[in-house]
Amino acid sequence: VHRQSFTSTATASSASENQTNANTTGIPPTTFDDRKRPFQVTTPIYYVNDKPHVGHAYTSIACDVIARYMRLSGREVFFQSGTDEHGQKVEDSAKAAGVEPQVFVDDVSGSFRNLLT
């Protein structure tokens, strides 16, 4: 069995500073999140050439869990999701369904909105 060990390079002062910051919000600062700006999380941009499936639900739920956790930790959160309603696959799927592309994307996009509400 191969095991790796990692050591912290934080100084005593930065470690105590991180502990103080963690105590005020519950989350220590990281190199990519200074905890001063709103926390932003986004789902992938979903393509509406078909109804949502388990993969869409998984990423939406994962982002929602992160957003809720951050809100409970006292952070302002921007949670964003959207669909891409353009492209050849969408037109092809609409044609196969026998409807106009706008009617098709309105219907399928509604399914994605229902997933997120």
Image (cartoon, helix red, strand yellow):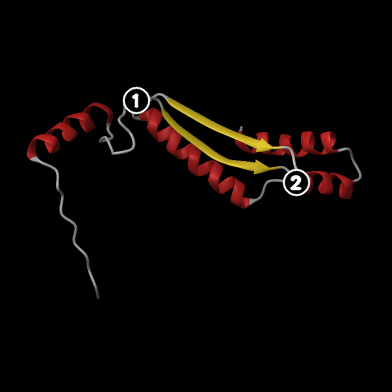
Residue at x-position 74% and y-position 47%: 50
Residue at the far right in the pictured view: 98
Q: Quadrant of the N terminus?
A: bottom left
User: Can you tell which mark lies on residue 49?
Assistant: 2
User: Can you tell which mark lies on residue 95?
Assistant: none
Marks 1/2: CA distance? 38 Å
Q: Residues within 10 Å of mark 1 (few under 14, many from 20)?
A: few
Q: Image quarter for residue 3?
A: bottom left
- Residue indicated by mark 1: 74
> Of 40 and 23, which appears nearest the observer?
40
SS label for mark 1: loop
Quick check: 46 above or below 1? above
Residue at x-position 90% and y-position 40%: 99
Amino acid on which disc 1 is placed: Gly
Q: Tell whether 4 sits left or right of 89.
A: left
Q: Residues within 10 Å of mark 2 (few under 14, many from 20)?
A: many
Residue at the far left in the pictured view: 12
Quick check: 95 above or below 70? below
Residue at x-position 27% and y-position 35%: 29
Amino acid on which disc 2 is placed: Asn
Q: Image quarter for residue 36?
A: top left
Q: Tell whether 81 sits left or right of 19.
A: right
